[in-house]
Amino acid sequence: MQLRSLTAVWHNPAFAAFLLARLTGMFATQIQAVVIGWQVYELTGEAMALAYVGLAQFLPMLLLLLPAGDLIDRYARKPILMASWGVATICAGTLWWLSTHAATGASAKVEALTGIYAALVLFGCSRAFSGPAVQSLLPQIVPREQLAQAIAANGMLMRAASIGGPLVGGLLYALGRGTLTYSVCAACFLLGVCFLIPVTTRYAEPRAEDAGSMWRRFGVGIRFIRQRPIILGTISLDLFAVLLGGVVALLPIYAKEILHVGPTGLGALRSAIAIGEVGAGLWLSMRPFNHAVGKRMFIAVALFGAANLVFSLSHWFWLSFFALAIAGAADMVSVYIRSALVQFSTPDNMRGRVSAVNMLFIGSSNELGEFRAGTAAAWFNPVTAAVLGGLCTLGVVGLWMRLFPTLRKVDKFEEASNG
């Protein structure tokens, strides 16, 4: 029965086209992320420079949260997503131009860093709209009874792109540095726009009438989240667990100074996370569960923190690789549960605003988490920063289990619609 249900999802041509679009967009994002991290650290050799990479992308997402969520609820979501990926193409083109016209000398290094950060600010503006648009578009493409399986299949394939992206990014940078790499990124973003064209939204619900100003409409969305502990607990758990415990920003330092594996090894370490995610996603696609989902989510986040602790203390490449793969698998299970709980809890006419807040929390946990990790590494050292982060993640899990007992007790996804 589960296998037939999963097959039915894949028989939806709009869903297949949507996945192709997301795959190419994710592939470009992953290539760009690994190359920028290595390029910035190679230019400066400073952990704080990596911290600013995350901050440059997070601040635009924070500032554009309100208009992004409001526009996505008021207008068609597919054109907004296409436009945001068009902006991402411009960002990749800018990074290509900076790499092509790179000069030497101290002043040239400052100019190159300034240009990279400016391009990342533009990319952050793009992600402020593309993130919530992608999340809120999926429920309009598949019927509700196939939504959990669609989320699992979507998550698995996105993580598959996360395997190839970093590996290809590291290889391309080793072969042709930024010029070749950013050309591939721009081409992938454009392909994503093209793949979105035939996507139809058969299951979109009629949009509600505008109610007052943008501020008032967004206030309604915030109150909706605050009044539902399942949504609030779910997205805030992701925020603090990854914000405090993520180690992705430290991977360039580990690859160069601790594990001594170079840019190719850096790509492999980033791919290790995705390998674990894909493995867990494949298992979830074949055997999706719908029992004790709240408890399983907390267990998965705790395992994520414990695996990051092992990575933090490791000086052996393969142990580090294995620990990151375990962390990725645990994160995939957590993402699967969190995404389904949020989607089942949210009516269609509120998904843009809820997804915008969710993306702000995800952006905080990822981009702002990179700033936290880089700053901590600069203040202390990379190992101490990573160890403290893993311990904080475990602490957050224990605290959130006490603060959100309703979330801990959720048994089936359908129960989320009640609170």
Image: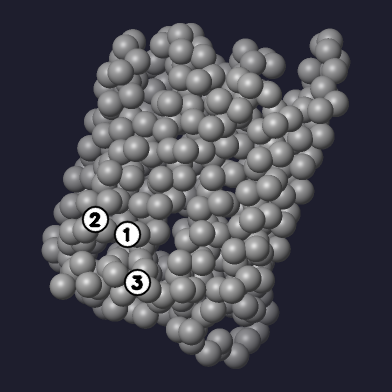
Q: Nearer the viewer, mark 1 or mark 3?
A: 3
Which image quadrant: the N terminus?
bottom left
In three-dimensional space, the C-alpha distance between marks 1 and 3, rounded to whole angstroms, equals: 11 Å
Q: Amino acid at mark 1?
A: Ala
Q: Is residue 135 left or right of residue 415?
A: right
Q: Which mark is residue 284?
A: 2
Q: Position of residue 131 (x, y in %)?
A: 55, 58
Residues 213 and 352: in front is 352
In three-dimensional space, the C-alpha distance between marks 3 and 2, rounded to whole angstroms, equals: 14 Å
| Labels 1 & 2 near each other (Cβ < 8 A) | yes
Q: Which mark is residue 9?
A: 3
Residues 264 and 69: in front is 264
Q: Residue at (41%, 75%) from the top-left corner? A: 12
Q: Is residue 174 above or below residue 249?
A: above
In three-dimensional space, the C-alpha distance between marks 1 and 2, rounded to whole angstroms, equals: 6 Å
Query: Reading the chain from its start, which is encountered first: label 3 or label 2?
Result: 3
